[in-house]
Amino acid sequence: MTTTASTVAALTPAEEVIAAVDRVIDAHLQATAERMAETSPVTSELIEPIRTFSAKGKRVRALIAWWGYELAGGTDAAASGIAQTAAGVEMLHAAALIHDDIIDASETRRGQPAVHTAFRAMHRDRSWSGDAKLFGDGAAIIAGDLCLSLSEELFSASALAASATAEAVRRHDDFRRDVMVGQYLDIRLQAAPVTGAELLPRAEEVLTYKSAKYSVEQPLLLGAALAGAGPELLEALSDFGLPLGRAFQLRDDELGVFGDPALTGKPAGDDLRQGKKTVLIGLTLAALADGDAQAAEQASWLMRRLGQPDLSLEELQQMNDLIRSCGALQQFEAEIDAQLDATHRGLDALAAHGIGDAARQQLAQYALMLTRRSA
């Protein structure tokens, strides 16, 4: 049976949600460590990096899944097991990040060594035989796979899973599948030849399926569907969640080029070093395509040098200056603003579905935090 939210006065404060999710993750990882120790004492080497990794993070997807449940009229968080559901969402995200760092050859995450980097260091520090890189990457892939398994365990442990409707099951399936599809679209875009005109729509595709839907819209709809939301409310929540997810990822892409490493935990110009063909790069090429012969040469140089292993600090600065001077960064910021405007229109429309002023104000403040951040 589907429901619409009758009156949702306010949402559980973010800090309370995050604390509850953290407790569930900590307890589940501790129980998992104890079970694994029965197999072999060395399994602590596998679970401890996951515990360290999952202890940090913004909990964006876990929080928005919990709030989706409440926006659809879900109550009694303790009995429903929404904390387990949200923790499962967070462990799926941990799996995606661990694998993403291997794919992108990112050595750090959140200012600390990435999981595969830590495993490589363990191999070297203990003077083990074989190739440290091969071991580190393999161990981290296994750690990511374990996080996927833990995500399923947590979801199944929730009372909500036992009573999930066909719609909720579909939303859960979409959430898990689409991020994998988006990841493939991303690595394909980096590898396959692409013209300047083709890059922007392909980058938009990656932004939508790898990040925007997965970061906000899908966990929001999953939580709402688990509370029995009807199609009208789900559509209204999508009108709020998808543009917010897009604005969130656009900001992330901007920080990947211009962010302060002390705040982002990533090296300066990390996306340029990795050769990421993002919307920002697509807008840059589009802007240069309208210019003269010098602009055409600049576009050609940008694509030749983007992601090259010997990319110098001077070249990084040249790329930064080019993105600014051609007007792409200004256009990019305007697109973030446009997506945020669409988010607010979606938020206003939620009033018709019984979402009260206080709840909408919480969502508005959260949207601002996601899109006006420096890390």
Image (cartoon, rainbow, N blue to C red):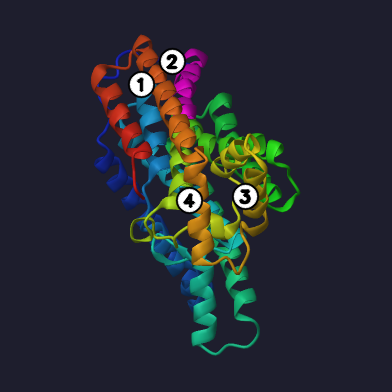
What is the three-letter code of the residue carrying label 3? Gln
Q: Which mark is residue 73?
A: 1
Mark 3 vs 4, N-terminal side: 3
Count all numbered tags in the image, as a single digit.
4
Name the quadrant containing residue 209.
top right
Q: Are marks 1 and 2 in contact (CB under 8 Å)?
A: yes
Foreground tag (4 vs 2): 4
Q: Quadrant of the rendered structure where residue 13 is?
A: top left
Q: Are marks 3 and 1 in contact (CB under 8 Å)?
A: no
Residue on which the image places disc 3? 298
Q: How far apart are the alpha carbons under marks 1 and 2?
A: 8 Å
Mark 1 vs mark 4: give the one in front.
4
List x then y, in percent, for residue 339.
45, 27
The residue under label 1 is which amino acid type?
Answer: Gly
Q: Is there CB contact under 8 Å for labels 4 and 2?
A: no
**Disc 2 secondary structure class:** loop
Around disc 3, counting alpha carbons within 10 Å, would you say few (fewer than 14), some (14 to 19), or many (20 or more)? some
Q: Tell me which numbered mark, 3 or 1, is placed earlier along the sequence.
A: 1
**Residue lying at 62% horizontally and 49% vertically, measured from the top left:** 298
Q: CA distance from mark 2 to mark 3?
A: 55 Å
- Bounds of the magenta segment: 224-245
Q: Which residue is mark 2?
A: 3
Q: In the drawing, does residue 210 fall left or right of residue 112? A: right
Which comes before the other along the chain, label 1 or label 2?
2
Q: Is residue 17 left or right of residue 43?
A: left
For marks 4 and 2 on the same chain, the one whose residue lies earlier in the sequence: 2
Give the residue at mark 4: 321
The kind of residue on which mark 4 rests is: Asp
